[in-house]
Image (cartoon, helix red, strand yellow):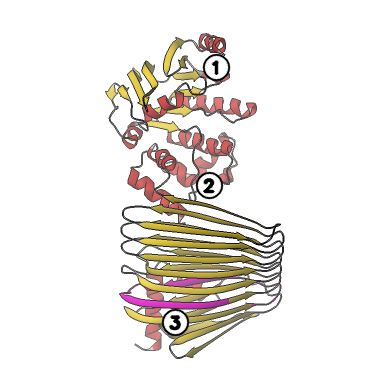
Amino acid sequence: MHILRLVDVSLEKEGRSILRNISFSINKGEIHAVLGANGAGKSTLARAIMGIEKANGKILFKEREISNLSITKRAKQGIRFMQQSPPSFEGIKIREYIKIDSAKSIEEIRKILEKVGLPAKYSERFLDDSLSGGERKRVELASLLAANPELIILDEPDSGIDMVSINRIKKIILEMNKNGSTILLITHKESMTSIADKAHLMVNGKIVASGAPKEINKLFKGLK
Amino acid sequence: MNFEEEFKKFIEEYEKSGFVSEDLLSSPRVIINESKVLDKKDIEGLIINTRKRGSSIYIDLILKRNVKLKIPVHMCMGVIKKEWAQRIIVNLKMESNSEMKILSHCFFPNSKDVKHFMKGKFEIGKNSKLIYEEEHFHGKHGAHVKADVEIEAGDRASYKSIFASKEGVLGRLELNYKIILLDNARGDVCTKAFGKKKDIISIIEYMELAGRNSHGLLKSRVATAENSSCIVKSVMKGIGDGSVGHVDCTEIIEGNGKISAIPIVEVYNKNARVTHEASLGKVNRKQLESLMSKGLTEGEATDVIIRGMLR
């Protein structure tokens, strides 16, 4: 069953085409990677699927059209989105943030935080500017692990992260997948596609090739 | 109402306003209802004197040298009646090498026309530390609160204050703080307020980094909703050699609220540095998107962001 299907998704901003007739589908339980250079339109695609950007064409979630649904309604249906640079929040504790869309107990949250490489005591820390960009991303990954949604869109979870941590992030994504989440992974690093079942190469707002991650990586290298 | 009945009623209203009476009654304290001192308890090293002159209540607090209080001192000022003009004058002197935390709880739960005017003068002695946390509850209709406080932090002294309001309507709130930091002193003033209905909020903060290596922060977090308005004027003057100051304003507007922020930063010494940052306007879009991506509606997400900011 297709959990996500895009049909001719296009988006223009100030007369410029950002997304051009994008069509692909993801089966339930798969990990797909969208690979492309900076400015290819990958993040816009992710934001359009979540409903943050208004796009033309059809977006179907579990074969039901969601193109006109708000961000909130898409989230309520089981879609989650991790921003490339998640924002910080003054006065909101990490455990409170995680509990917004998860029924996990405080003990479970502490264990999840350790799993993503943060100390358990961070559950009581505020999600404010005192966290580094990398820590903030880990909190977001912990939140997604706790929520266990049907579809997760990850916008460059690897950007600004060291190699050791990238391996941990890959493990976390695989665990999310094992727990039942389908994953759409946006990245500009070929190494990230190794965990994907299928990859798509994006150039100038278009998906120019789709296939096995190794093949897509080769094509991407050829473009550099 | 006799004294016992009044005291009982006062404590009931205090709890209904969201405060904890057990904490209040187990601490050194001054309890004032309207223009009457209901209770006063000092502790070794802390002298609390109160007196009434005209319609004003004077509170004098002296913390003796080398005394470091482990439990907070409560200053509880309330008005149970619907109408009253309460005038409080606080003189606080902390001798050298002393430490204290004051919890100032002001509540006017039945206010239709309650006025609370407070004047304060705080002297924080050499190497001493004061934490002053003030929390207000103004009921459904709001009150008129005006506070004028002058603080002087001596050599290596530290002053930290937080003003916050609980749920409810503020009414008219005017806060005027003047803080002078002497050599190596630290000042950290944070004011949080949420304007609703037709609330009028005015926050004027003045911090002078007078001494060598003095460090100061003026931070305001205000949200205005419905037809409320707020003006925040933050003045930071860098005078002392090596002094460092920062003004940080984040103000969110909802509905027909209005906000003006006027940061004034002045430097009178080539070795001083003062910075400011201000963010005024609607709720941060990225924060909203992040919370809506977790299934909250825009309204729910806005509420979470504002409550967090004012926490």
Residue located beneath label 2 in the image: A128
Q: Give the main secondary structure of the magenta stretch.
A: strand
Q: Where, by quadrant of the figure, is residue B184 drawn?
A: bottom right
| As drawn, B201 above or below B290 | below
Magenta highlight range:
B94-121
Most distant residue in the bottom direction: B54
Q: CA distance from mark 2 to mark 1?
A: 33 Å
**If the image is split into quadrants, where does the C terminus of chain A sit?**
top right
> What chain is tagged by disc 1?
A
Q: Which mark is residue A212?
A: none
Residue located beneath label 3 in the image: B87
Q: Which mark is residue A194?
A: 1
Specify the amino acid type for callout 1: Ser
| As drawn, A91 above or below A211 | below
User: Taking the image as drawn, is residue B19 in sight?
Assistant: no
Q: Residues within 10 Å of mark 3 (few under 14, many from 20)?
A: some
Residue A70: % across, % down: 31, 35
Quick one: label 2 or label 1, which is nearer the N terminus?
Answer: 2
Magenta stretch containing residue B107, yes or no? Answer: yes
